[in-house]
Image: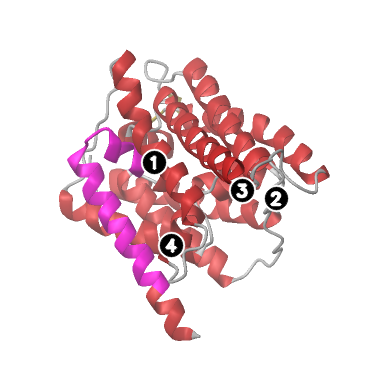
Amino acid sequence: MDKRLNIFTALTFALLSGLIFGFGLILAGMANPDKVLAFLDLAGLWDPTLGLVMGGAIAVGFIAFRIAGKRSSSFLGLPINIPTSRIIDKRLVFGGIIFGMGWGLVGICPAPAFVLLGAGSIKGIVFLFAMLVGMGIFELIESQRK
Amino acid sequence: MLIDWNNFTPWTALAGGALIGIAAALFILINGRIAGITGIIGGLFRPVMHDAGWRIAFTAGLIFAPVIWLLFAALPEIKIDASYGLLAFAGLIVGFGARLGSGCTSGHGVCGISRLSPRSIIATLTFMSTGFLTVFVMRHLLGAS
């Protein structure tokens, strides 16, 4: 395939993947932080929705990653980038704890934060901006460690 | 445990979840990439951006999804009770923590568990139990709404 056409196709599919991902979040109610918190509130009136969303996504994803694992390159001939690390370290666990705290405080995680931006939610945009600053701080600390 | 049957939406949950799975499937099978938002955005902070295109395209898709949705139907309710201060603090630690732990709900929770990665399973169990605990402390111990 012509190289430029290939890059265009890849970008189009990346955009399409993001769109479908966003539609899925909206349809499932996961762009609503209140509904996410209702899942995390086990001791209150519990809304199991988020669990089913993940179940549905993993059911499809499981098949896709089985296929991807058997291929040496993608359908567009691009390399398939699957993480290979199997190390379970403090960074993984502490990162999960810090992320989980923030997620539990307001019910927003990174993907829905971008959907909230598109939906024009001012509170969502405040969260998104702070999240990008948080990622920037991480990047800064990382670059000084090296 | 009391289930909130009035607000539990199993069918749209499964259908929405399947769409998220299809998006992750397309992304790995066509672009050869993991649909993990933390990693996708994290890569944009690097000084050398040779692969910014697909990262920006995927993120643009997420941002445009509600815009296109609005052309055909009203968006489902979006309710955020948290104050601006709390949102800013939570955003800060979500961004930092997700990068430190190499992933969030999409990368570890959906893609990682789909490929049965032990790292992602541990990460997901960690942030989910911390999320449960945080909400318990906030709502039932500190009495916030």
Residue at the image point whose x is 38% and y is 59% from the top: B95
Disc number for residue B68: none
Using a 10 Å C-alpha cutoff, classify the residue at mark 1 as few (fewer than 14 neighbours), some (14 to 19) or many (20 or more): many
> In the rendered image, which residue does mark 1 sit on?
B60
> In the rendered image, which residue does mark 4 sit on?
B97
Which one is in front, B121 or B71? B71
User: What amino acid is at disc 4?
Assistant: Gly
Of callouts 3 and 4, the N-terminal one: 3
Q: Disc 3 versus disc 2: distance between alpha carbons?
A: 6 Å
> In the rendered image, which residue does mark 3 sit on?
B33
Where residue B2 appears, x then y in whole percent? 43, 26
Disc number for residue A80: 2
Q: Secondary structure at mark 2?
A: loop
Where residue A55 appears, x then y in whole percent? 60, 31
Q: Quadrant of residue A13?
A: top right
Residue A66 covered by magenta stretch: no
Of callouts 1 and 3, the N-terminal one: 3
